[in-house]
Amino acid sequence: MIPVIALIGRPNVGKSTLFNALTRTRDAIVADEPGLTRDRQYGVGKVGQKKFIIVDTGGLSGEQQSLDDLMARQTLLALQEADIVLFMVDARTGINSGDEVIASMVRKAGKQTTVVLNKIDGVNPEFAEADFFALGFSEMAMVAASQRKGINPLVEQVMRDFPDDVESDEEPEGPSIAIIGRPNVGKSTLINRLVGEERVVAFDQPGTTRDSIPVPFERHGKHYTLIDTAGVRRRGKVHETVEKFSVIKTLDAIEKANVVVVVVDARDGITDQDLTLLGYVLNSGRSLAIAINKWDGLEPEQREYNKTELHRRLNFVDFANQHFISALHGTGVGDLMKSIDQAYASAFKQFNTKDLTDLLEEAVFKHNPPMQNGRKPKLRYAHQGGKNPPIIIIHGSRTDSLAESYKRYLMKFYIKKLKLMGTPVRIEFKVGDNPFAGKRNKLTKRQQSKKKRMMKFVKKKK
């Protein structure tokens, strides 16, 4: 088993910076602002021959009591599953009452604990260490996480009792599912419902989630990775630098996912921002499912009106299943998972060239390509060019002049005939090179004589 290391401490002591340094990624958002991390963030780190799982947690400050309670619950869960605890403190500010409260929590967990003095650059290490001995822990280490100083000695110190070259089983394959939507539509609540535990902080306040949090889980023997993302508002309303980074990480999560679930607030219906997100998912080529959340709180008349509006405004993504759910109570969530499985399977389907070419001939027979500049494009054969999403490459002549409407017709035709659910189809066109382009046909002597006779005949006629 790979050891699990949990990072615990007050806000803004450098936990996320150390997390990024240990995992050699930028998965955790880092800024000079307290309270950025609120959920458990997992990563895999390796220093030399030492491999481990690192867990970043939210800082415990005592402010915003109701939200801080939820963050504290996440920290306690991280403590329970950890083999090693790195209790991070700020060497520049020294010990305070918040450190003492967290130290009491860590002692009750009874785990192997090392106090990590961060930001030691510019301070006297001996004085700083003497100050933090009051917390009652014998193991201490000093680092400057932002400059990656002292990180290798820290890992060697805390993992001295664990063997080198710990081989772990390969991560189970399965769909990666990004949960996206506007702020406060219930994305985190949906993930907690699917996982069956309070895995991410869900709070009735927009902007609770700031990072993109991957959450592995298993359902009916199948492995999945859910990605909780920050809510995306209209660009004109995004002012904070941290929120801009959150939006970037959300869009990055869409690119990396196999299936995207767009969560919509049933009380608001489909907004322009929801349509913008759907358009981005389509442009990315990701498989798609739509979850209309908080459906249980609507009156019957409002439900009928919303269904009509959904049908009208979501016509361009008619291949995606819509689910009316309540993430809080679990209504309809099981059916949503079925659609996710269907979308994932459709995105990775394999098709043979004969079937795709036969369908192309059928599509052309039912609806010929419109003529462009007096000439009609010819579509000859098709084959598969990729997966996730399925890419169909069509060979022919003058395909560069095909109308966009006809390209959409072909996409919808293939989706319907191939019985694909929840995934778009990309159509790409290839024009064959003309081997005689730019070459003059050389005539034989007999052809040249015949041409001269014909020319004389034409002149006599005139």
Image (spheres, helix red, strand yellow):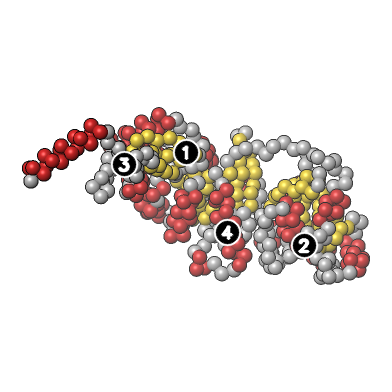
Q: Residue at x 27, y 43 (%)?
A: 376
Q: Residue at x 19, y 37 (%)?
A: 451
Marked residue nearer the N-terminal end (1 or 4) = 4
What type is the residue that disc 4 sits on? Ile
Residue denoted by label 3:
440
How far is the residue under mark 2 from the one under mark 4? 24 Å
Quadrant of the image occupied by residue 454: top left
What type is the residue that disc 3 sits on? Arg
How far is the residue under mark 2 from the one under mark 1? 45 Å
Provide the secondary structure element on which disc 2 rests: helix
Check disc 2: other Cα within 10 Å, few if <14, some if 14-19, many if 20+.
few
- Residue nearest the viewer, comparing 112 with 189: 112
How far is the residue under mark 1 from the one under mark 4? 29 Å
Provide the secondary structure element on which disc 1 rests: strand
- Residue nearest the viewer, comparing 200 with 274: 274
Check disc 4: other Cα within 10 Å, few if <14, some if 14-19, many if 20+.
some
Report if residue 420 is visible in the image: yes
Residue denoted by label 2:
147
Marks 2 & 4, CB-CB < 8 Å contact: no
Residue denoted by label 1:
385
Image position, residue 139 (x, y; %): 89, 55
Q: Which mark is residue 212?
A: none
Q: Which mark is residue 248?
A: 4
Q: Residue at x 40, y 45 (%)?
A: 318
Quadrant of the image occupied by residue 90: bottom right
What type is the residue that disc 1 sits on? Gly
Image position, residue 7 (x, y; %): 77, 55
Check disc 1: other Cα within 10 Å, few if <14, some if 14-19, many if 20+.
some
What type is the residue that disc 2 sits on? Gln
Marks 1 & 3, CB-CB < 8 Å contact: no
Report if residue 331 is visible in the image: no
